[in-house]
Image: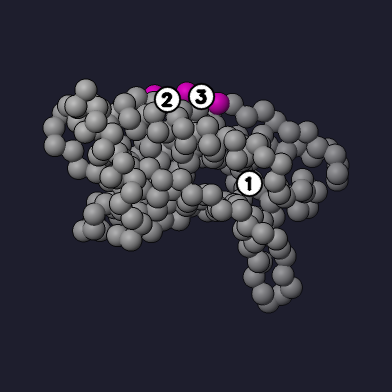
Amino acid sequence: MNCRSEVLEVSVEGRQVDEAMLALLHTILLHRSTGKFHYKKEGTYSIGTVGTQDVDCDFIDFTFVRVSSDELDRVIRKAVAEFKDALGNSGSDGVGQISVEFYQKKKSRWPFSDECIPWEVWSIKVNVVNLANEQERQICREKVGEKLGEKVINIVEVINRHEYLPKMPTQSEVDNVFDTSLKDVQPYLYKITFQITDSLGTSVSTTMRRLIKDTLAL
């Protein structure tokens, strides 16, 4: 199986890291989740509804949509908080990457553990910029909002392509494809990881600084 890999790049101010990552990760999980499966008998099931809600950002001119699941939100927020803390404690230039990997399990014979086979990975490269004053912060607030809007459209376009998805499982195999631990939503099996590095490049941050400088010159 070929694993699809998508890379997004964003440049943000330190206080915007949480909201930018939440906006992108929630957008991805929104489109990679279903309602809970209710099996009547093997091979016959109904799917519950997935509620959504709007979230207004405090430090970015942006509103994103997330699955209306407090459990899923807590999981994503915990991962983003750990990523932000690692960024702040790294001593590097505030450069890192957070990824969400979707996978399915393949049962293995005892005594081997199940094999996890990834089928889609989204990586978000993040560069934290330092701004000089409140005027620059206000411009960054607007520009980051515009960039996030573009990223969300990109995510939706990619997900709407007719690409590989694990086939709908039977009741006995549902845990090999979906995370059934949440009571109100059923995302495809996934894991969120991150890394802090100073080797992701400066093209994105340079573009953001240029945007701010050009706006100030108007």
- Label 1 or label 3, whichever comes before in sequence order: 3
Question: Dot 3 corresponds to which residue?
Answer: 53
Magenta residues span 52-57
Label 2 is placed on what type of residue? Thr
Element under disc 3: strand
Q: Quick check: 2 left or right of 6?
A: right
Question: Dot 1 corresponds to which residue?
Answer: 188
Q: Quadrant where the C terminus lies?
A: top left
Dot 3 alpha-carbon crowd within 10 angstroms: few under 14, some 14 to 19, many 20 or more: few
Please, is residue 55 above or below residue 190 in the view?
above
Gap between marks 3 and 2 measured at Cα: 10 Å
Label 3 is placed on what type of residue? Gln
Question: Dot 2 corresponds to which residue?
Answer: 63
Based on the picture, tell me whether residue 202 belongs to the magenta stretch.
no
Of badges 3 and 2, the one in the foreground is 2
Dot 1 alpha-carbon crowd within 10 angstroms: few under 14, some 14 to 19, many 20 or more: many
Element under disc 1: loop
Secondary structure character of the magenta stretch overall: strand
Mark 2 and mark 1 in contact? Answer it, CB < 8 Å. no
Dot 2 alpha-carbon crowd within 10 angstroms: few under 14, some 14 to 19, many 20 or more: some
Gap between marks 1 and 3 measured at Cα: 20 Å
